[in-house]
Amino acid sequence: MERRNPIGICEWAMPITGPQVCKFVGELGYDGLQLSIGTYEKRFELSWKVTQEAYRELAAQYNVRFASIATRALDFYSMFAPDGSEEQYAALASIEKGIQACEALDVPVFMIPNFVKSEAKTPEQVQLLVKHLKWACDVAADYGVLVAEENVFTVEDTVRLFDAVDRDNLRLYFDLQNYYLHRGAYTPELIEPLMPYIVQVHAKDGKNGDLSGAPLGEGDVSLKASIAELQRLGYDGWIVNENYYDVPPLVNEGDNPVEKIRNDLVTLRDVLGHDQY
């Protein structure tokens, strides 16, 4: 029987990337990975068949599943760039290539994060976000893929966004730190009203405004309370560790990133009560 709340980790948060990451996380005991489609400069590495075959082979060998695929290119290439520009092409190509990679690797969810250059801050940008999400959902529907939108909108603005997009395959990728970090919100209070939209969850922690910068459970994020609320409401999907072990401050804390990654897995197992299963 598949375990409730399988635990994954983000490929881009670790000191090792590429297909060998399957061996790395499998040996540590993680259930799976959230992959990245790659960079525009390298023409989205995960879109290539040879790359997909390497990931598939090592995932099978080390009993690792792929929870979802994300585009991180939107941090650097704006979804809201002018029509016909190279920047807009790069942003939208990362989405289309990512969705196609989901189908090729039997991955059910593609994540679209809206931060940095693709954060919707104005009414005009929100309108463009709606337009692009409609397009992305329509593309994804042809491949049997769910689109997971990640943002820090208020509950009311999230509901309005989902109503405006009006696609059955749109979901929310819920992050346990971002709402607190960006808006000072108490994350557990957001879970129940957003629960109908949540498909997967990022777990990360931080202190004094650091993004993904503290061992899980040791920062300012209400990790235990958030997970308790998710479980109270019947959430049994992926919890994906997004602590950043390859950049400060975590990279500066000791010389062994493997130990930190393993310790965060132990924390998540304890909070989730995995010993009960």
Image (spheres, rainbow, N blue to C red):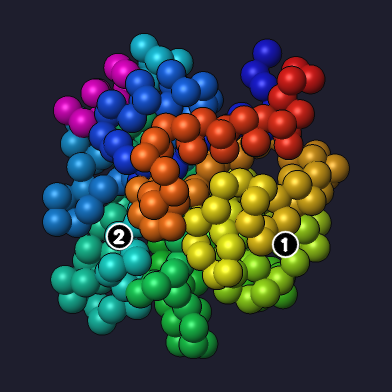
Q: Which of 71 and 206 is in front in this view?
A: 206
Is 62 above or below relative to 236? above
Earlier sequence position, callout 2 versus callout 1: 2
Where does label 2 land, which residue?
73
Q: What element carries label 1?
A: loop
Q: Disc 1 marks which amino acid?
A: Thr
Is 174 above or below relative to 80? above
Q: Which residues lie in the magenta part?
A: 50-58
Q: State the separation of the CA atoms marked 2 and 1.
A: 26 Å
Q: Position of residue 180 (x, y in %)?
A: 65, 68
Where does label 1 land, which residue?
187
| Residue 172 on the magenta segment | no
Specify the quadrant that holds the N terminus.
top right
The residue drawn where x is 24% and y is 23% is 53
Left or right of 211 on screen, residue 81: left
Q: Main secondary structure of the magenta part?
A: helix
Q: Which of 274 and 78 is in front in this view?
A: 274
Q: What element carries label 2?
A: helix
